[in-house]
Amino acid sequence: MCLQKSLIATVVVCGFSVIGTQSILAQTSRGSVETMQHTEHREALQRAFAEAPQPARERRDVVWATAGNEDLTADLFWPDGDGPHPIVVWIHGGGFRGGFKELGEFACRTFAANGYVAMNINYRLAPEHKFPAAVNDCLGAIVWIKKNAADFNGDPEHIAVAGESAGGNLSAMVAYAAEDNRWKPTGAQAGDPKPIVNVTIPVYGVFDFSALEGNRRDQILDTYLASRDDLAAASPLNYVTPQSVPTLLVVGDADSLYPESTKLKQRLEELQVPHDMLIADGADHAFIIWEWDQPNSKLAHKAMLAFLNEHLRSPPPLKLTAWSGTWLPERDPENCGELECKARLLPNGKWEATFRGYCNRQFLYEVKMTGREQNGEVKFEGEADLGPREGIYKWTGKIAEGQFTGIWQSKNKPAKKGTFEMQQSVAP
């Protein structure tokens, strides 16, 4: 998408010397609008607060966890009505070493005015708290809002994570890497919900630290990361899979970090992950913060709302725990093709499916697949090795409206496609 060029100069929030100006947020480290040292930007945020939509309900400075001696706080905004309303968790920018939750208030109040519960969080900052402290904190915030969603009329099963600059990196880490065993979500206890989300909106973030060069990489190593070994571990690009959640990328084409978003877009395309990308014409870094009242920022907020509405609101989610079914397609020349399928919802929010294929009633192969609910469907992908004659049997498919539709193919046969009825059953 193309927009008119931005009218207001921007200041870097990511902590890199993108346009030669030190981030005022990095100077403040942690504080409020009132303590910002740069009058122009303090006044810009104060005007944004004055003109932002007024939420029906709000609760400020909620302590959602304590890490060491530091209280981690959040502001929550939500609409009237019993709900349950879908949830958006917003992560502020600041180069991992600065910034504060109020930077995301305009966006969060906009979400709340449009039917969402918005949780605007603080997290521990570098260099005092190195990676993965911020990742653990953001994951912990997801766990907390899932546990406490009812207090805000929120829906813990429909949740998005979004953020700008450093928060763009962290929101992508939460979305793509939540199930990696190296993380320890802050404040989470045994038996708590998993920090799984349904949608992510990373705004002009860094997604591959190993691709950064020179001064940028040095700054990250000096502040956020403990060693070069963390360059890959802290890069969301390395965690994307075909089962990753729908993603909206937002970036300006004048941002020197623009290639980071295009690189992540390419990975999402390669793995066929549902995604979209808003490219703001002429916009530099941090435009949705400092240019909140300009066309680029207004379009970005509209795009974020549209993406959330598409992926969190409709169509209605599947309210199922398991499926089972069998199918006997038209016979092929070898008189094969019988299938049976069982699918169940796992505690981590993903689906597991087992397909067993038969030929003349004799067992031929088994395929284990994982899937995730997206847009009212459960989508699966998997493969099985049938030996040198058949090769790898590849499966893709989906369950929707009581039917399984699948495509499967081996090296010596053309692709087959079939649909068969599934019956809802109780998960074991």
Image: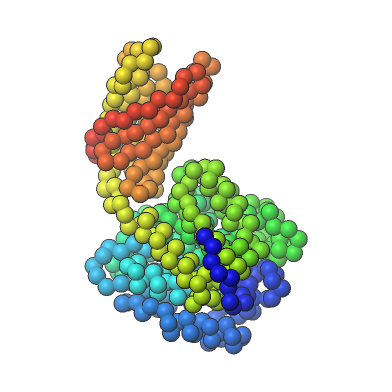
Q: Residue 355: where, in percent of width, then height?
A: 37, 28
> Can residue 328 be seen in the rendering of this structure?
yes
Q: Is residue 400 above or below residue 125?
A: above
In the foreground, 143 or 335: 335
Q: Residue 288: where, in percent of width, then height?
A: 52, 71
> Can residue 92 be seen in the rendering of this structure?
no
Residue positioned 68% across, 54% down in the render: 211
Q: Quadrant of residue 59?
A: bottom left
Q: How is the image coloured?
A: rainbow
Residue positioned 34% across, 62% down in the render: 86
Number of marks in picture: 0
Question: From the viewer's perspective, is 275 left or right of 18?
Answer: left
Q: Residue furthest right?
A: 214
Residue positioned 50% across, 51% down in the render: 176
In the foreground, 231 or 43: 43
In the foreground, 275 or 177: 275
Question: From the viewer's perspective, is 143 left or right of 283?
Answer: left
Q: Residue 170: where, in percent of width, then height?
A: 54, 61
Q: Residue 419: where, in percent of width, then height?
A: 31, 30
Q: Is residue 40 above or below residue 172?
A: below
Question: From the viewer's perspective, is 151 left or right of 170?
Answer: left
Q: Is residue 383 above or below residue 21?
A: above
Q: Quadrant of the C terminus?
A: top left
Residue positioned 51% across, 15% down in the render: 389
Q: Quadrant of residue 259?
A: bottom right
In the foreground, 66 or 148: 148
